[in-house]
Image (cartoon, helix red, strand yellow):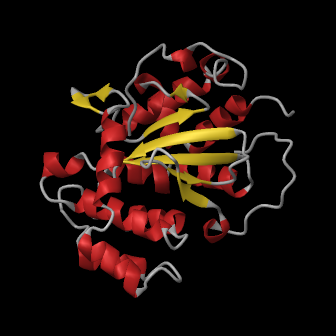
Amino acid sequence: MRMKRAHRRLTAVVVSGLLGAAVVSCAPGHQGAADGGGPRQGRGGAGSTSRTEAAYPGLADVPEKVEPDGSTVLVGDPGARMTVRLYEDPRCPVCKEFETEGGGPVLTEWVLRHKAKVEYTMASFLDPRLGGDGSKKAVNALRAALERGKFAEYHAVLYQDQPAEEVDGFTDARLLQLAGKVKGLRSPSFDAAVRSMKYRGFVNSAESAYAAAGHGDGHAGPGTPTAVVNGYQIPVESNGLLFDPGVFGKFLTLADGPSA
């Protein structure tokens, strides 16, 4: 999960010159790395499209739901031809960097414009490594927010106000306080779900799905953040592109392929 910022930036610069070759197998209809080749560990613009729908005004208007697997949250137009799967842990500071300073805001723009949908697998592996249960509590609260159609908005708030990694700061009280920043999220049912860990089953299923997705740094799970774009998992040696908005936008554009 940890990588020096300078190394990530250097990786992004190098990748910017190699994007054409790197994503040739990402475009619809192509195979290759998307079939499982290449490294499995990951960490942590606008392209052409034939879709003509008006952009969603904001995250509050974007569709979101739990997928049939019971562990994935889908955010965005289900008909968007680009699918980005993200593996994240709420306590991961590298995920915060991606979501707030890196490619996350670019990806949000693609979602708002119906160009991409995001499949979130929210892990909680940092709790046993660091101590505490803040990741589990946060994932449970995110699932509770989904019941009110507020997952995407609350997800953004949790990363913007993420406590230090070594501090088990996602307590019930803090999660409820942060929920107050999302219009319409707080309610007796939401508050009760947060305090009671109502969605513990979802938390466990999401962590199991993360652990089954690969291995990174000697542990189960591919590392966070890991992104899989149209079936192509960005390899660890190229994950610097996740933290450079311009490069990440170019990557999405090339992965999107030509307009239909």
Picture quadrant where residue 217 is located: top left
**Where is residue 60 drawn, in percent x and y?**
61, 71
Foreground: 145 or 260?
145
- For the view shown, which residue lies furthest in the front direction? 68
Where does residue 28 sit, x and y in percent of width and height? 72, 26
In the rendered view, tell whether residue 132 sits above or below residue 206: below
Image quadrant containing the C terminus: top right
Q: Residue at x 68, y 49 (%)?
A: 78
Residue drawn at the location 49% of the way across and 17% of the way down: 36
Left or right: residue 113 compared with residue 247:
right
Q: Is residue 189 above or below residue 235?
A: below
**Residue lying at 31% horizontally and 45% vertically, measured from the top left:** 207
Q: Quadrant of the image for the N terminus?
A: top left
- Residue 74 lies left or right of residue 167; in this view the side is right
Q: Position of residue 175 (x, y in %)?
A: 32, 74
Q: Quadrant of residue 81?
A: top right
Mark yes or no: residue 103 visible. no
Q: Is residue 167 rendered to the left or right of residue 70? A: left
In this view of the protein, which residue sits in the foreground, 215 or 14?
Answer: 215
Residue 244 vs 21, above or below: the answer is below
In the rendered view, tell whether residue 76 sits above or below residue 23. below
